[in-house]
Amino acid sequence: MALLDFLAAIFAAALAGMGVGGGGLFVIYLTLVRGAEQLAAQGINLCFFLALCVPSLAVHFAKRKIRLPIALLFGLSGVFGTFLGAYLLSLATPVLLRKAFGWLLLASGALALFKKKK
């Protein structure tokens, strides 16, 4: 099973690197194939992509594609949003979260499917 986990992680990372949305697919893999709880799968997914963002961030810094003041503003906003989200999460039930995540995936897929190309 470790080989399958490794291949699923590589596949999800490759899709995420191309902007396809590998994170959602990785959560689906973790819940359906590995039997992980929804919240645990989402937490694993976040840790997975945090580890993957470090090399990407280094490349973007090297190419001078990051505006530091804007990045700091977004980072601080993200920290605030994290605490707000954690509080709201403590109020929600796992069933509600599972349904909301399912609808989010459906909406995201529909938008990607019917999006007009420029």
Image (cartoon, rainbow, N blue to C red):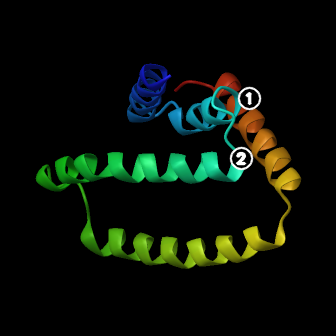
Q: Would residue 99 be found to the left or right of residue 49 on screen?
A: right
Amino acid type assigned to the residue bearing label 2 in the image: Gln
Instruction: Relative to 113, say whether 63 is above or below.
Output: below
Work out which residue is located at the far front of the displayed protein and give it. 1
**Residue matched to label 1:** 110
Amino acid type assigned to the residue bearing label 1 in the image: Ala
Q: Is residue 49 left or right of residue 101?
A: left
* Residue at 69 percent of width and 30 percent of height: 109
- Measuring from the top left, give residue 93's x and y in whole percent: 86, 61
Callout 1: few (<14), some (14-19), or many (20+) C-alpha neighbours within 10 Å?
few
Counting from the top left corner in percent of width and height, residue 71 is at 34, 68
Residue at 40%, 76% (x, y): give it.
73
Camera-side residue of 43 and 103: 43
Q: Position of residue 70 (x, y in %)?
A: 35, 71
Q: Secondary structure at mark 2?
A: helix
Q: Residue at x 65, y 26 (%)?
A: 33
Pick the front one: 40 or 1: 1
x and y, in percent, of residue 59 in the image? 18, 47
Seen from the viewer's position, the closer of residues 98 and 63 is 98
Question: Residue 99 shows which numbered tag?
Answer: none
First in residue order: circle 1 vs circle 2:
2
